[in-house]
Amino acid sequence: MKKKHFWILAGLILLIFLSIPFIHILKIKWNETDHKIKIPKGYTNDASQLNLTKVDTIINVPNHKNEIQEQLRKIIKYAQENKLKISIAGARHSMGGHTIYPDGIVLNMLPYKHMELDTINNILTVGSGALWEDAIQYLDNYGKSIAIMQAFSSFSIGGSISVNGHGWQKNLPPISSSVVSFTLMNDKGEILNCSREENEELFKLVIGGYGLFGIILDVKLNVVDNVALRYKYIQLKSENYLSYYKKFISENPNVNLVFGRLRISDQLFLEEATLNFFEKTKQSPNPLQQEKEKSIESKRLVFRGSTNSEYGKRLRWDLETGMNHVSNNNIYSRNDLLNDHVSLIENKDTTSTDILHEYFIPENNFNHFIQDIKPVLKNTEIDLLNVTIRGVQKDNDSYMNYARENVFGFVLLFNQKKTERQEKAMKELTNYLVDVALKNKGTFYLPYRLHIDKAKMRKSYPQADSFFRLKLKYDPNEIFNNKFYQHYK
Ligand SMILES: Cc1cc2nc3c(=O)[nH]c(=O)nc-3n(C[C@H](O)[C@H](O)[C@H](O)COP(=O)(O)OP(=O)(O)OC[C@H]3O[C@@H](n4cnc5c(N)ncnc54)[C@H](O)[C@@H]3O)c2cc1C
Protein backbone atom coordinates (compact mmCIF):
# COMPACT_ATOMS: atom_id res chain seq x y z
CA MET A 1 0.00 0.00 0.00
CA LYS A 2 1.26 3.44 -0.87
CA LYS A 3 2.10 5.72 2.07
CA LYS A 4 -0.59 8.22 0.99
CA HIS A 5 -3.28 5.49 0.90
CA PHE A 6 -2.20 4.24 4.28
CA TRP A 7 -2.77 7.67 5.85
CA ILE A 8 -6.17 8.08 4.16
CA LEU A 9 -7.24 4.66 5.47
CA ALA A 10 -5.88 5.40 8.95
CA GLY A 11 -7.72 8.75 8.92
CA LEU A 12 -10.95 7.06 7.89
CA ILE A 13 -10.63 4.43 10.64
CA LEU A 14 -9.98 7.17 13.20
CA LEU A 15 -12.98 9.14 11.95
CA ILE A 16 -15.24 6.09 12.22
CA PHE A 17 -13.87 5.38 15.70
CA LEU A 18 -14.49 8.95 16.84
CA SER A 19 -18.00 8.97 15.35
CA ILE A 20 -19.19 5.88 17.26
CA PRO A 21 -20.19 7.85 20.39
CA PHE A 22 -22.08 10.41 18.29
CA ILE A 23 -23.85 7.68 16.34
CA HIS A 24 -24.76 5.96 19.61
CA ILE A 25 -26.23 9.18 21.05
CA LEU A 26 -28.01 10.10 17.80
CA LYS A 27 -29.60 6.65 17.67
CA ILE A 28 -31.10 7.33 21.11
CA LYS A 29 -32.53 10.64 19.93
CA TRP A 30 -34.01 9.08 16.76
CA ASN A 31 -35.69 6.29 18.69
CA GLU A 32 -37.31 8.64 21.19
CA THR A 33 -40.80 9.96 20.90
CA ASP A 34 -41.87 13.36 22.15
CA HIS A 35 -45.44 12.13 22.74
CA LYS A 36 -46.18 12.35 26.43
CA ILE A 37 -48.43 9.57 27.68
CA LYS A 38 -51.87 11.11 28.21
CA ILE A 39 -53.70 10.28 31.41
CA PRO A 40 -57.37 9.57 30.50
CA LYS A 41 -59.97 11.90 32.02
CA GLY A 42 -61.06 10.75 35.47
CA TYR A 43 -57.77 8.95 36.10
CA THR A 44 -54.51 9.84 37.79
CA ASN A 45 -50.97 8.40 37.93
CA ASP A 46 -47.58 9.13 39.50
CA ALA A 47 -43.92 9.28 38.41
CA SER A 48 -43.72 5.47 38.22
CA GLN A 49 -46.24 5.50 35.33
CA LEU A 50 -47.41 2.20 36.80
CA ASN A 51 -50.25 3.51 38.93
CA LEU A 52 -53.00 4.54 36.52
CA THR A 53 -56.08 4.69 38.76
CA LYS A 54 -59.67 5.89 38.37
CA VAL A 55 -60.54 8.59 40.86
CA ASP A 56 -63.69 10.49 41.81
CA THR A 57 -62.34 14.03 41.25
CA ILE A 58 -59.06 15.92 41.05
CA ILE A 59 -59.37 19.30 42.71
CA ASN A 60 -56.86 22.09 42.14
CA VAL A 61 -56.62 24.12 45.34
CA PRO A 62 -56.53 27.94 45.10
CA ASN A 63 -53.41 30.00 45.88
CA HIS A 64 -55.05 32.31 48.38
CA LYS A 65 -54.83 31.58 52.13
CA ASN A 66 -58.47 32.33 53.04
CA GLU A 67 -59.90 30.73 49.92
CA ILE A 68 -57.95 27.50 50.39
CA GLN A 69 -59.13 27.03 53.97
CA GLU A 70 -62.77 27.57 53.03
CA GLN A 71 -62.54 25.24 50.02
CA LEU A 72 -60.73 22.45 51.89
CA ARG A 73 -63.26 22.55 54.75
CA LYS A 74 -66.08 22.05 52.24
CA ILE A 75 -64.22 19.17 50.58
CA ILE A 76 -63.53 17.44 53.91
CA LYS A 77 -67.21 17.80 54.93
CA TYR A 78 -68.36 16.48 51.54
CA ALA A 79 -65.95 13.54 51.75
CA GLN A 80 -67.09 12.68 55.32
CA GLU A 81 -70.76 12.81 54.29
CA ASN A 82 -70.25 10.76 51.14
CA LYS A 83 -67.76 8.31 52.62
CA LEU A 84 -65.08 9.34 50.14
CA LYS A 85 -61.35 9.29 50.84
CA ILE A 86 -58.96 12.18 50.20
CA SER A 87 -55.44 11.75 48.84
CA ILE A 88 -53.02 14.67 48.66
CA ALA A 89 -50.73 15.28 45.69
CA GLY A 90 -47.72 17.55 45.15
CA ALA A 91 -45.45 16.92 42.15
CA ARG A 92 -46.33 13.16 42.31
CA HIS A 93 -42.77 11.91 42.22
CA SER A 94 -43.48 9.26 44.80
CA MET A 95 -43.94 5.93 43.00
CA GLY A 96 -46.32 3.71 44.90
CA GLY A 97 -49.66 5.50 44.68
CA HIS A 98 -48.80 7.59 47.76
CA THR A 99 -50.85 10.41 46.18
CA ILE A 100 -53.71 8.17 45.01
CA TYR A 101 -56.77 6.43 46.49
CA PRO A 102 -59.03 4.51 44.05
CA ASP A 103 -62.31 6.40 43.48
CA GLY A 104 -61.20 9.03 45.98
CA ILE A 105 -60.77 12.79 45.81
CA VAL A 106 -57.26 13.96 44.84
CA LEU A 107 -56.17 17.37 46.10
CA ASN A 108 -53.66 18.93 43.73
CA MET A 109 -51.71 21.23 46.07
CA LEU A 110 -49.40 22.73 43.42
CA PRO A 111 -51.28 26.03 42.95
CA TYR A 112 -50.81 26.90 46.66
CA LYS A 113 -47.41 28.55 46.48
CA HIS A 114 -47.34 31.95 48.16
CA MET A 115 -43.96 32.97 49.65
CA GLU A 116 -42.63 35.45 52.15
CA LEU A 117 -39.13 35.84 53.63
CA ASP A 118 -38.41 37.05 57.14
CA THR A 119 -35.00 38.56 56.43
CA ILE A 120 -34.23 39.15 60.10
CA ASN A 121 -34.68 35.56 61.26
CA ASN A 122 -33.91 33.90 57.90
CA ILE A 123 -37.22 32.05 57.80
CA LEU A 124 -39.19 31.45 54.60
CA THR A 125 -42.97 31.07 54.93
CA VAL A 126 -44.21 29.17 51.91
CA GLY A 127 -47.38 27.49 50.60
CA SER A 128 -46.91 23.71 50.62
CA GLY A 129 -47.61 23.41 46.87
CA ALA A 130 -44.61 25.54 45.90
CA LEU A 131 -41.84 23.69 44.09
CA TRP A 132 -38.28 24.01 45.38
CA GLU A 133 -37.41 25.72 42.10
CA ASP A 134 -40.00 28.45 42.87
CA ALA A 135 -38.46 28.95 46.31
CA ILE A 136 -34.89 29.04 44.92
CA GLN A 137 -35.89 31.63 42.32
CA TYR A 138 -37.53 33.75 45.05
CA LEU A 139 -34.68 33.42 47.58
CA ASP A 140 -32.01 34.18 45.00
CA ASN A 141 -33.24 37.79 44.91
CA TYR A 142 -32.43 38.07 48.63
CA GLY A 143 -29.04 36.32 48.49
CA LYS A 144 -30.52 33.33 50.32
CA SER A 145 -30.75 29.61 49.58
CA ILE A 146 -32.64 26.50 50.71
CA ALA A 147 -31.02 24.79 53.71
CA ILE A 148 -31.96 21.17 52.87
CA MET A 149 -33.72 19.76 49.82
CA GLN A 150 -33.50 16.89 47.32
CA ALA A 151 -31.16 16.53 44.39
CA PHE A 152 -33.82 17.87 41.99
CA SER A 153 -35.80 21.06 42.43
CA SER A 154 -38.97 19.83 40.69
CA PHE A 155 -40.69 18.53 43.83
CA SER A 156 -43.21 20.28 46.07
CA ILE A 157 -42.35 21.43 49.56
CA GLY A 158 -45.41 19.67 51.07
CA GLY A 159 -44.50 16.42 49.27
CA SER A 160 -40.87 16.62 50.35
CA ILE A 161 -41.81 17.19 53.99
CA SER A 162 -44.29 14.32 53.83
CA VAL A 163 -41.58 11.89 52.67
CA ASN A 164 -38.97 13.70 54.79
CA GLY A 165 -36.60 13.99 51.83
CA HIS A 166 -32.86 14.51 52.04
CA GLY A 167 -30.28 15.78 49.63
CA TRP A 168 -26.60 16.36 49.06
CA GLN A 169 -26.04 19.17 51.55
CA LYS A 170 -22.96 18.14 53.53
CA ASN A 171 -23.53 15.94 56.59
CA LEU A 172 -27.02 17.18 57.43
CA PRO A 173 -30.13 15.34 58.62
CA PRO A 174 -33.19 15.11 56.32
CA ILE A 175 -35.47 18.11 55.60
CA SER A 176 -37.15 17.68 59.01
CA SER A 177 -34.30 19.52 60.72
CA SER A 178 -34.89 22.66 58.62
CA VAL A 179 -38.65 22.82 59.31
CA VAL A 180 -39.48 25.41 61.98
CA SER A 181 -43.24 24.81 61.93
CA PHE A 182 -46.25 24.31 59.66
CA THR A 183 -50.01 24.65 59.76
CA LEU A 184 -52.09 21.52 59.20
CA MET A 185 -55.78 21.15 58.35
CA ASN A 186 -57.04 18.06 60.16
CA ASP A 187 -59.97 15.72 59.47
CA LYS A 188 -62.38 18.16 61.16
CA GLY A 189 -61.29 21.11 59.04
CA GLU A 190 -59.44 22.73 61.97
CA ILE A 191 -56.11 24.48 61.47
CA LEU A 192 -53.38 23.35 63.88
CA ASN A 193 -49.98 24.94 64.25
CA CYS A 194 -47.34 22.19 64.54
CA SER A 195 -43.78 22.70 65.77
CA ARG A 196 -41.31 21.25 68.27
CA GLU A 197 -43.19 23.16 70.98
CA GLU A 198 -46.82 22.99 69.83
CA ASN A 199 -48.68 19.81 68.76
CA GLU A 200 -45.31 18.14 68.98
CA GLU A 201 -46.58 14.62 68.34
CA LEU A 202 -48.31 15.70 65.12
CA PHE A 203 -45.18 17.59 64.03
CA LYS A 204 -43.23 14.35 64.24
CA LEU A 205 -45.93 12.26 62.57
CA VAL A 206 -46.64 14.60 59.67
CA ILE A 207 -42.97 14.93 58.67
CA GLY A 208 -42.47 11.68 56.77
CA GLY A 209 -46.18 10.96 57.36
CA TYR A 210 -47.18 10.51 53.69
CA GLY A 211 -50.26 12.75 53.84
CA LEU A 212 -52.07 10.58 56.39
CA PHE A 213 -52.62 13.12 59.19
CA GLY A 214 -54.01 16.14 57.37
CA ILE A 215 -53.16 18.75 54.78
CA ILE A 216 -49.96 20.75 55.27
CA LEU A 217 -50.69 24.37 54.34
CA ASP A 218 -48.13 27.00 55.33
CA VAL A 219 -44.57 25.95 56.09
CA LYS A 220 -41.84 27.88 57.88
CA LEU A 221 -38.37 26.81 56.77
CA ASN A 222 -34.91 27.91 57.89
CA VAL A 223 -32.91 29.32 55.00
CA VAL A 224 -29.16 29.86 54.58
CA ASP A 225 -26.94 32.25 52.63
CA ASN A 226 -26.47 31.68 48.95
CA VAL A 227 -22.74 31.27 48.34
CA ALA A 228 -20.28 30.77 45.49
CA LEU A 229 -18.86 27.24 45.50
CA ARG A 230 -15.79 25.76 43.83
CA TYR A 231 -16.18 22.30 42.27
CA LYS A 232 -13.72 19.58 43.25
CA TYR A 233 -13.57 16.01 42.12
CA ILE A 234 -11.74 12.83 43.10
CA GLN A 235 -11.78 9.49 41.31
CA LEU A 236 -11.10 6.61 43.68
CA LYS A 237 -11.63 2.96 44.48
CA SER A 238 -14.99 2.51 46.16
CA GLU A 239 -13.34 0.52 48.98
CA ASN A 240 -11.49 3.74 49.90
CA TYR A 241 -14.61 5.91 49.79
CA LEU A 242 -14.98 6.26 53.56
CA SER A 243 -11.38 7.24 54.24
CA TYR A 244 -11.47 9.81 51.42
CA TYR A 245 -14.85 11.05 52.64
CA LYS A 246 -13.46 11.57 56.13
CA LYS A 247 -10.35 13.38 54.90
CA PHE A 248 -11.75 15.51 52.06
CA ILE A 249 -15.34 16.07 53.24
CA SER A 250 -15.94 15.60 56.96
CA GLU A 251 -12.65 17.23 58.00
CA ASN A 252 -12.96 20.09 55.52
CA PRO A 253 -15.24 22.81 56.96
CA ASN A 254 -15.47 24.54 53.56
CA VAL A 255 -17.36 21.71 51.87
CA ASN A 256 -21.00 22.70 51.36
CA LEU A 257 -22.46 20.19 48.89
CA VAL A 258 -21.25 16.65 48.17
CA PHE A 259 -22.27 13.46 46.40
CA GLY A 260 -20.59 10.26 45.30
CA ARG A 261 -21.21 8.02 42.32
CA LEU A 262 -20.32 4.38 41.67
CA ARG A 263 -19.22 2.99 38.33
CA ILE A 264 -21.89 0.70 36.86
CA SER A 265 -20.33 -0.61 33.65
CA ASP A 266 -19.32 -4.30 33.67
CA GLN A 267 -15.63 -3.61 33.99
CA LEU A 268 -14.88 -2.47 37.58
CA PHE A 269 -18.58 -2.76 38.45
CA LEU A 270 -19.14 -0.78 41.71
CA GLU A 271 -15.39 -0.87 42.28
CA GLU A 272 -14.63 2.62 41.08
CA ALA A 273 -16.23 5.77 42.48
CA THR A 274 -16.19 9.52 42.15
CA LEU A 275 -16.48 11.98 45.00
CA ASN A 276 -17.86 15.32 43.84
CA PHE A 277 -17.86 18.24 46.24
CA PHE A 278 -18.22 21.99 46.32
CA GLU A 279 -16.17 24.25 48.60
CA LYS A 280 -17.09 27.72 49.79
CA THR A 281 -15.13 30.57 48.20
CA LYS A 282 -14.81 34.23 49.15
CA GLN A 283 -16.42 35.33 45.85
CA SER A 284 -20.00 36.60 45.58
CA PRO A 285 -22.38 34.19 43.85
CA ASN A 286 -23.67 35.06 40.38
CA PRO A 287 -27.41 35.54 39.93
CA LEU A 288 -29.39 32.39 39.13
CA GLN A 289 -28.84 31.22 35.54
CA GLN A 290 -31.80 30.53 33.33
CA GLU A 291 -32.06 27.03 31.80
CA LYS A 292 -29.22 26.04 29.47
CA GLU A 293 -31.41 23.92 27.18
CA LYS A 294 -28.71 22.56 24.89
CA SER A 295 -26.26 21.38 27.52
CA ILE A 296 -29.14 19.83 29.49
CA GLU A 297 -30.29 17.94 26.38
CA SER A 298 -26.81 16.59 25.61
CA LYS A 299 -26.34 15.48 29.23
CA ARG A 300 -29.77 13.83 29.12
CA LEU A 301 -28.93 11.96 25.90
CA VAL A 302 -25.63 10.69 27.30
CA PHE A 303 -27.54 9.50 30.35
CA ARG A 304 -30.32 7.86 28.30
CA GLY A 305 -27.70 6.30 26.03
CA SER A 306 -26.61 4.16 28.96
CA THR A 307 -30.00 2.38 29.11
CA ASN A 308 -29.60 -1.33 28.37
CA SER A 309 -26.21 -0.68 26.76
CA GLU A 310 -22.84 -1.70 28.15
CA TYR A 311 -21.20 0.55 25.57
CA GLY A 312 -23.42 3.47 26.67
CA LYS A 313 -22.60 2.89 30.33
CA ARG A 314 -18.87 2.96 29.64
CA LEU A 315 -19.24 5.99 27.40
CA ARG A 316 -21.20 7.86 30.09
CA TRP A 317 -18.64 7.08 32.79
CA ASP A 318 -15.77 8.18 30.53
CA LEU A 319 -17.52 11.35 29.40
CA GLU A 320 -18.64 12.32 32.88
CA THR A 321 -15.27 11.69 34.50
CA GLY A 322 -13.62 13.52 31.59
CA MET A 323 -15.97 16.47 32.09
CA ASN A 324 -15.26 16.40 35.83
CA HIS A 325 -11.57 17.00 35.02
CA VAL A 326 -12.47 19.90 32.77
CA SER A 327 -14.85 21.43 35.34
CA ASN A 328 -12.49 20.96 38.30
CA ASN A 329 -12.19 24.34 40.12
CA ASN A 330 -15.12 25.88 38.23
CA ILE A 331 -17.23 28.20 40.38
CA TYR A 332 -21.02 27.93 40.69
CA SER A 333 -23.66 29.61 42.79
CA ARG A 334 -25.23 27.29 45.37
CA ASN A 335 -28.69 28.15 44.06
CA ASP A 336 -27.67 27.16 40.52
CA LEU A 337 -26.43 23.81 41.75
CA LEU A 338 -29.62 23.13 43.70
CA ASN A 339 -31.81 24.17 40.79
CA ASP A 340 -31.50 21.04 38.63
CA HIS A 341 -34.72 19.99 36.92
CA VAL A 342 -35.75 16.34 36.81
CA SER A 343 -36.00 16.61 32.98
CA LEU A 344 -32.19 16.18 33.07
CA ILE A 345 -32.80 12.42 33.16
CA GLU A 346 -36.22 12.27 31.44
CA ASN A 347 -37.10 8.93 29.86
CA LYS A 348 -38.95 9.44 26.56
CA ASP A 349 -39.32 5.72 25.79
CA THR A 350 -43.02 5.04 26.43
CA THR A 351 -42.49 1.27 26.79
CA SER A 352 -40.31 1.61 29.87
CA THR A 353 -40.12 3.62 33.06
CA ASP A 354 -37.37 4.59 35.52
CA ILE A 355 -37.73 3.38 39.09
CA LEU A 356 -35.79 4.58 42.11
CA HIS A 357 -34.72 2.70 45.22
CA GLU A 358 -32.79 4.03 48.19
CA TYR A 359 -31.08 2.22 51.06
CA PHE A 360 -29.68 3.90 54.16
CA ILE A 361 -26.63 2.08 55.50
CA PRO A 362 -24.63 2.82 58.67
CA GLU A 363 -21.05 3.85 58.00
CA ASN A 364 -19.62 0.61 59.50
CA ASN A 365 -21.33 -1.51 56.87
CA PHE A 366 -20.66 0.75 53.88
CA ASN A 367 -18.18 -1.62 52.15
CA HIS A 368 -20.09 -4.78 53.09
CA PHE A 369 -23.23 -3.34 51.54
CA ILE A 370 -21.47 -2.62 48.25
CA GLN A 371 -20.02 -6.14 48.18
CA ASP A 372 -23.42 -7.67 49.02
CA ILE A 373 -25.40 -5.83 46.35
CA LYS A 374 -22.94 -6.70 43.56
CA PRO A 375 -24.21 -10.26 42.88
CA VAL A 376 -27.84 -9.17 43.35
CA LEU A 377 -27.49 -6.43 40.74
CA LYS A 378 -25.55 -8.73 38.39
CA ASN A 379 -28.20 -11.45 38.56
CA THR A 380 -31.23 -9.35 37.70
CA GLU A 381 -32.63 -8.63 34.26
CA ILE A 382 -33.54 -5.11 35.43
CA ASP A 383 -31.20 -2.48 34.02
CA LEU A 384 -29.23 -0.41 36.53
CA LEU A 385 -28.77 3.20 35.37
CA ASN A 386 -27.12 4.96 38.27
CA VAL A 387 -25.85 4.69 41.84
CA THR A 388 -25.40 7.90 43.82
CA ILE A 389 -24.22 8.13 47.44
CA ARG A 390 -25.07 10.81 50.00
CA GLY A 391 -24.32 11.17 53.69
CA VAL A 392 -27.43 11.65 55.88
CA GLN A 393 -27.02 12.61 59.52
CA LYS A 394 -29.19 11.25 62.31
CA ASP A 395 -32.76 12.58 62.24
CA ASN A 396 -34.20 13.59 65.62
CA ASP A 397 -37.51 14.90 64.37
CA SER A 398 -39.65 12.51 62.36
CA TYR A 399 -41.64 9.56 63.71
CA MET A 400 -41.12 7.25 60.70
CA ASN A 401 -37.43 7.94 60.91
CA TYR A 402 -35.17 6.19 58.38
CA ALA A 403 -31.91 7.78 59.62
CA ARG A 404 -31.81 6.61 63.22
CA GLU A 405 -28.04 7.07 63.20
CA ASN A 406 -25.64 8.69 60.72
CA VAL A 407 -26.02 6.79 57.47
CA PHE A 408 -25.07 6.81 53.82
CA GLY A 409 -27.95 6.80 51.35
CA PHE A 410 -27.36 4.63 48.27
CA VAL A 411 -29.73 5.86 45.55
CA LEU A 412 -30.22 3.28 42.79
CA LEU A 413 -32.01 4.20 39.57
CA PHE A 414 -33.28 1.41 37.32
CA ASN A 415 -34.96 1.21 33.96
CA GLN A 416 -37.88 -1.21 33.87
CA LYS A 417 -40.05 -2.33 30.94
CA LYS A 418 -43.76 -1.84 31.54
CA THR A 419 -44.43 -5.58 31.40
CA GLU A 420 -45.70 -8.07 33.98
CA ARG A 421 -42.44 -9.98 33.67
CA GLN A 422 -40.28 -6.98 34.56
CA GLU A 423 -42.66 -5.88 37.30
CA LYS A 424 -42.18 -9.34 38.85
CA ALA A 425 -38.41 -9.13 38.36
CA MET A 426 -38.37 -5.67 40.00
CA LYS A 427 -40.34 -6.96 42.98
CA GLU A 428 -37.88 -9.83 43.41
CA LEU A 429 -34.91 -7.48 43.08
CA THR A 430 -36.32 -5.04 45.64
CA ASN A 431 -36.84 -7.85 48.13
CA TYR A 432 -33.27 -9.09 47.69
CA LEU A 433 -31.91 -5.56 48.12
CA VAL A 434 -33.99 -4.91 51.22
CA ASP A 435 -32.71 -8.19 52.68
CA VAL A 436 -29.15 -7.00 52.03
CA ALA A 437 -29.93 -3.63 53.64
CA LEU A 438 -31.42 -5.36 56.70
CA LYS A 439 -28.41 -7.66 56.95
CA ASN A 440 -26.25 -4.52 57.04
CA LYS A 441 -28.46 -2.88 59.70
CA GLY A 442 -29.89 -0.47 57.16
CA THR A 443 -33.34 0.78 56.15
CA PHE A 444 -35.07 1.29 52.82
CA TYR A 445 -36.79 4.49 51.64
CA LEU A 446 -40.59 4.49 51.61
CA PRO A 447 -41.68 6.76 48.71
CA TYR A 448 -41.02 4.16 46.04
CA ARG A 449 -42.82 1.02 44.74
CA LEU A 450 -44.83 -1.00 47.24
CA HIS A 451 -42.92 -4.23 46.71
CA ILE A 452 -42.13 -5.04 50.32
CA ASP A 453 -44.71 -6.79 52.50
CA LYS A 454 -45.95 -5.50 55.85
CA ALA A 455 -43.83 -7.88 57.94
CA LYS A 456 -40.54 -7.06 56.20
CA MET A 457 -41.37 -3.35 56.23
CA ARG A 458 -41.61 -3.54 60.02
CA LYS A 459 -38.10 -4.97 60.22
CA SER A 460 -36.89 -1.67 58.76
CA TYR A 461 -39.48 0.44 60.56
CA PRO A 462 -40.26 -1.13 63.96
CA GLN A 463 -42.24 2.04 64.77
CA ALA A 464 -44.75 1.31 61.96
CA ASP A 465 -47.42 -0.33 64.16
CA SER A 466 -47.57 2.60 66.57
CA PHE A 467 -47.42 5.06 63.63
CA PHE A 468 -50.53 3.48 62.11
CA ARG A 469 -52.25 3.36 65.54
CA LEU A 470 -51.60 7.10 65.90
CA LYS A 471 -53.02 7.61 62.42
CA LEU A 472 -56.34 6.28 63.78
CA LYS A 473 -56.11 8.53 66.84
CA TYR A 474 -55.88 11.64 64.63
CA ASP A 475 -58.03 10.47 61.71
CA PRO A 476 -60.40 7.74 62.98
CA ASN A 477 -62.43 7.64 59.74
CA GLU A 478 -59.25 7.26 57.68
CA ILE A 479 -60.36 10.13 55.49
CA PHE A 480 -56.77 10.96 54.46
CA ASN A 481 -55.89 7.85 52.57
CA ASN A 482 -53.73 6.47 49.78
CA LYS A 483 -52.23 3.25 48.40
CA PHE A 484 -49.21 3.49 50.70
CA TYR A 485 -51.51 3.36 53.75
CA GLN A 486 -53.63 0.55 52.28
CA HIS A 487 -50.51 -1.52 51.62
CA TYR A 488 -48.58 -1.11 54.87
CA LYS A 489 -51.20 -0.47 57.61
C1 LIG B 1 -36.30 11.31 39.84
C2 LIG B 1 -36.56 11.35 41.32
C3 LIG B 1 -35.58 11.85 42.17
C4 LIG B 1 -35.79 11.88 43.54
N1 LIG B 1 -34.82 12.38 44.33
C5 LIG B 1 -34.98 12.39 45.66
C6 LIG B 1 -33.95 12.90 46.51
O1 LIG B 1 -32.91 13.37 46.05
N2 LIG B 1 -34.15 12.85 47.84
C7 LIG B 1 -35.31 12.36 48.38
O2 LIG B 1 -35.43 12.37 49.60
N3 LIG B 1 -36.27 11.90 47.60
C8 LIG B 1 -36.15 11.89 46.27
N4 LIG B 1 -37.16 11.42 45.48
C9 LIG B 1 -38.32 10.79 46.16
C10 LIG B 1 -39.61 11.44 46.48
O3 LIG B 1 -40.62 10.85 45.73
C11 LIG B 1 -39.68 12.92 46.49
O4 LIG B 1 -38.80 13.39 47.47
C12 LIG B 1 -41.11 13.42 46.82
O5 LIG B 1 -42.02 12.81 45.96
C13 LIG B 1 -41.12 14.86 46.68
O6 LIG B 1 -42.27 15.60 46.51
P1 LIG B 1 -43.52 15.51 45.53
O7 LIG B 1 -44.05 16.88 45.45
O8 LIG B 1 -43.24 14.79 44.28
O9 LIG B 1 -44.46 14.60 46.45
P2 LIG B 1 -45.70 13.70 46.04
O10 LIG B 1 -45.20 12.48 45.39
O11 LIG B 1 -46.70 14.50 45.33
O12 LIG B 1 -46.24 13.33 47.50
C14 LIG B 1 -45.48 12.57 48.37
C15 LIG B 1 -46.30 12.32 49.65
O13 LIG B 1 -46.55 13.56 50.27
C16 LIG B 1 -47.94 13.76 50.51
N5 LIG B 1 -48.22 15.19 50.36
C17 LIG B 1 -47.93 15.97 49.29
N6 LIG B 1 -48.26 17.26 49.55
C18 LIG B 1 -48.81 17.28 50.78
C19 LIG B 1 -49.39 18.30 51.59
N7 LIG B 1 -49.45 19.57 51.20
N8 LIG B 1 -49.88 17.95 52.81
C20 LIG B 1 -49.80 16.66 53.24
N9 LIG B 1 -49.29 15.66 52.51
C21 LIG B 1 -48.79 15.96 51.30
C22 LIG B 1 -48.62 12.87 49.50
O14 LIG B 1 -49.91 12.49 49.92
C23 LIG B 1 -47.67 11.71 49.39
O15 LIG B 1 -47.95 10.76 50.37
C24 LIG B 1 -37.00 11.39 44.10
C25 LIG B 1 -37.98 10.88 43.24
C26 LIG B 1 -37.77 10.86 41.86
C27 LIG B 1 -38.84 10.30 40.98
Image (cartoon, rainbow, N blue to C red):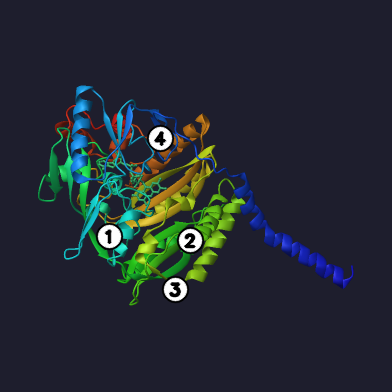
Q: Is residue 53 left or right of residue 106?
A: right
Residue 124: percent from left, percent from top: 22, 57
Whether the residue under disc 3 has CB within 8 Å of ligand 1 = no
Q: Report which residue position mark 4 lands on.
A: 45
* First along the sequence among labels 3 and 1: 1
| Kind of element beneath mark 1 | loop
Gap in angstroms between the C-alphas marked 3 and 1: 23 Å
- The amino acid sitting under disc 2 is Lys
Marks 1 and 2, Cα distance to the nearest angstrom? 24 Å
Q: Secondary structure at mark 4?
A: loop
Tag 2 or tag 3, which sits nearer the N-term? 2
Question: Measuring 73% from the left and 64% from the top, which residue is drawn there?
Answer: 14
Quickly name the residue at label 3: 329
Q: Nearer the viewer, residue 51 or 424?
A: 51
Please tell me the numbered disc located at residue 27.
none
- Say what amino acid the circle numbered 1 marks: Ala
Please name the residue that numbered disc 2 is placed on.
Answer: 292
Q: Residues within 10 Å of mark 1 (few under 14, many from 20)?
A: some
Residue 147's disc is: 1
